[in-house]
Amino acid sequence: MEIVTFGESMVLFNPDTTGPLRYVHNFNKSIAGAESNVAIALARLGHHVGWFSKIGDDEFGRYIKAIIRGEGVDVSRVVTDPHNNTGLLFKERFAHVNPNVYYYRKNSAASNMVIKDLDFDYIKSSKILHVTGITLALSPSARETVFKAVEFAKANNVLVSFDPNIRLKLWRIEEARPTLLEMAKLADIIFPGQDEGRLLLGTEDPKEIAREFLDMGCKIVAVKLGKEGCYLAKQEEDEFVTGYIVEKPEDTVGAGDGFAAGFLSGVLQNFSLRGCGQLANAVGAMATLVRGDMEGFPTLQQVQRFMGTEEYIDR
């Protein structure tokens, strides 16, 4: 196993039309979840990746598991909870702006994750463990489970990748900040955005964000700058990597997860810091070309064509 990740995935209902949900009658069903997004994106890039969670003993849980398994991700450690339901998510769309998001995940199966749900041998078998701040926000037991998994990974020479992924609909920043910073101190690779730098560190300057996290002990900091690209830093190396322009993005949700997956793919392939950033930028940009949280993640051949490293013959 190259990468293992875990966290809540929900069934996503995407409206067919724009406007307030009270006027919407038809929805497309798919899945949403930061960690499963990363897992799916990595699998499409050709990596051996595992995702686990706790799902309800219901049709929504079975649907999530089937979709992720169908994308080539190992789901053998997913736990089924007979007492709690799978979480749901509805989007509300208005023209040319990011959608509103409505969660129905309180007391969901995934929010009831506990340490005994972890398979430590499974984590130990991987090269990288990827976690996000979303799972930390779900509940005290989920938070305890993430910290236990990360501490075990570090004790067994598994790299820890961390995306803060602040969700203020799940917890207040006063609660989130100390927890996320505590996790950052354990991370080897961290993926903050500028807004997260402001919320956690009081600065949106990419260089200052990177320096703060490096001083905490992170080995690599990849600051996401949206369409501008990214700023990457190690202790002895740093640089800005220009992004890819998407003239008419269809949906920006999932771009950050695609970025993380592209970067981790580069790490697994021993790319240079710049090479990791270029691949991350490309996968993140391609995620915005398609409506949906994970539908736009490219295969390796598709991203190579997008980057211009492989010739494309369309007919």
Image: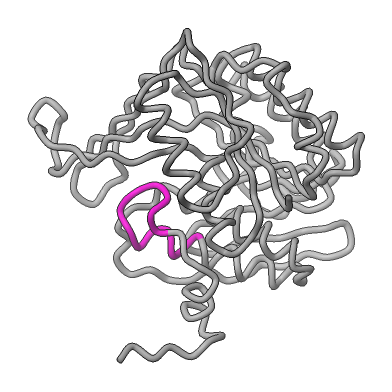
Asked whether residue 212 appears in the rendered view, the answer is: no
Give whichever of 130, 173 is nearer the camera: 130
**Span highlighted in magenta in the image:** 284-296
Foreground residue among 134 and 181: 134
Left-right relation of 87 to 135? left
**Please, is residue 300 above or below residue 179 in the view?**
below
Please name the residue shown 56% across and 48% down the image.
73
**Looking at the image, residue 304 lies above or below residue 156:** below
Question: Quick check: is 48 in the magenta stretch?
Answer: no
Our reading of the magenta stretch's main secondary structure is: loop
Q: Is residue 285 magenta?
A: yes
Residue 213, x across and y down, in percent = 78, 43
Query: Which residue is farthest top?
Result: 83
Q: Residue at x 72, y 16 (%)?
A: 116
Q: Which image quarter is the C terminus in?
A: bottom left
At x 15%, y 44%, the residue is 16
Q: Position of residue 27 (x, y in %)?
A: 18, 38
